[in-house]
Amino acid sequence: MTPPRTGPLVFEQYYLDCLSHASYLVGDRTTGRAVVVDPQRDVDEYVAAAARHGLTVERVIETHVHADFLSGHLELAARTGARISYGSVAVVDFATEPLEDGAHLSLGQVDLEIMHTPGHTPESVCVVVREHAGDPFPYAVLTGDTLFIGDVGRPDLLAAAGTPAEEMARALYRSTRERLLALPDATRVYPAHGAGSACGKNLSTELSCTIGRQRRDNHALAAMTEDEFVTLVTEGQPAAPGYFAFTSVRNRQARPVLDEDTPVRLLAPDAFLAARAGGATVLDTRDPESFAAAHLVGAVNVPLGGRFAELAGEVLDAGERVLLCGAPDDAHEARKRLARIGFDQVLGALATGIGSLPAAHLTHVVRVDADVLADRLAEAADATEPVDVRGPGEVRETGTVPGARLVPLPELLARLGELPVGRPLVVLCASGNRSSVAASVLRARGYEAVDLRGGYSAWRDMVARTCDPAAAGRAARTTRDGGAP
């Protein structure tokens, strides 16, 4: 959270690590008026902060229609009576107060200027914040997904909906050069995302910067032609998680608001199994080792720590009914994180530990250690197929296991037909988290799959201990697709 200020401007940044999402409270302490920009769906934190500062949230500003999380505009409007605003070209199914390019919103002494910056999406805007309306130099600019620290927003997310990535990229070139880089170098830059977000390729771990530093250091802002920029920002983008299309549509709809306080329904074993028999998907939120030791047949393992919601959104369908299995005390947090991406069909959670379920419904798997996988590949390379679910950039940087088929996790469900049924699959990622997710999904769909304990990190450690690392590294860069990845 941003340190408190002493002038009229109240400015706080909120950062949600699990989605790499930044949102903002901007207010004027002389009038008590405030806005929230790009809120997450669970909005208690903003309401509490506004009360602490003596502010009234009178408007929610969305810098664009988000795809990677379900925004909290409807929740904040319901809680506070705030108006909802987007750039004037946005199309949504609920009442808004559109913001024209160049519009100024006065909170009192604090002034907000709306700058249309299409490129990531057609309706993208940035918000220029001045502590006093007449200040020649802005305090900050909230850049949404137009400009990140170290990168710019990807222009390709709407390609499937008929908006060409090249068209968006050309608009993004003009928005960054003609609008954002026209701001003074001292202007602070506050984006909507940081490192780990799939909304860009090269996001920094820094949560703020300045226009001057970005002008100097951001590779996407370097001197180049428009055509060169288009090539740069359209090539090599990571696969977008499958839930992005759903969430983008959901953010345009007048959907039900989230009730953060309703407890998760805790189910006895018999009721839990009955709900599962009715077609619900069991989402096991325990760590991979606990899951491997014992779990319900057909369960999908997505550990609650880290990027839980994003991983769940990559391997579950948005409309699936979900049963949670893990520590009962974790159920509320798991449901909240799923709600942040619009996955609201949580029927309940197992009230007791996994050991309370009948043994006939349980199974276990043996995760494969790196040396065991090496032995299998040496004895009969065609008997076991490694499947690497990391992103292409990760594989290019480090290499992979010899003969591995590259199927990034966001693409797994769409590419199931490429994987052999009846042949042992060993799934790997960087450390063993995503691989447990992927292997559980594959087993639930009838594949013979286990995962590599410790991921590619464990493989590299094993190689360093047992053979010439350089030679092994060269071999590891050969994939089942042929050649270097």
Image: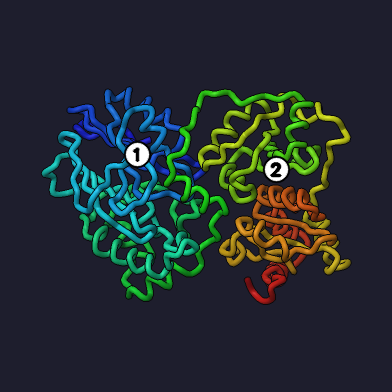
Give amino acid for label 1: Tyr
In the foreground, 203 or 142: 142
**Where does residue 413 sit, x and y in percent of width and height?**
66, 56
Against 458, residue 356 (above or below) is above
**Where does residue 476 sit, x and y in percent of width and height?**
70, 68
In the image, taking residue 245 as reference, residue 351 lies left or right, namely right
Picture residue at 51% right of the left edge, 67% below the top = 236
Q: Quick one: label 2, few (<14), some, or many (20+) residues within 10 Å?
A: many
Give amino acid for label 2: Asn
In the foreground, 427 or 188: 427
Picture residue at 67% right of the left edge, 26% below the top = 328
In the image, taking residue 231 as reference, residue 442 lies left or right, namely right
Q: Residue 301: give its label.
A: 2
Q: Residue 24: give its label.
A: 1
**Where does residue 206 sit, x and y in percent of width and height?**
41, 48
Task: Pick out the residue farthest to the left.
Answer: 134
Disc with the residue nearer the chain's start (2 vs 1): 1
Against 15, residue 197 (above or below) is below
Q: Quick one: label 1, few (<14), some, or many (20+) residues within 10 Å?
A: many
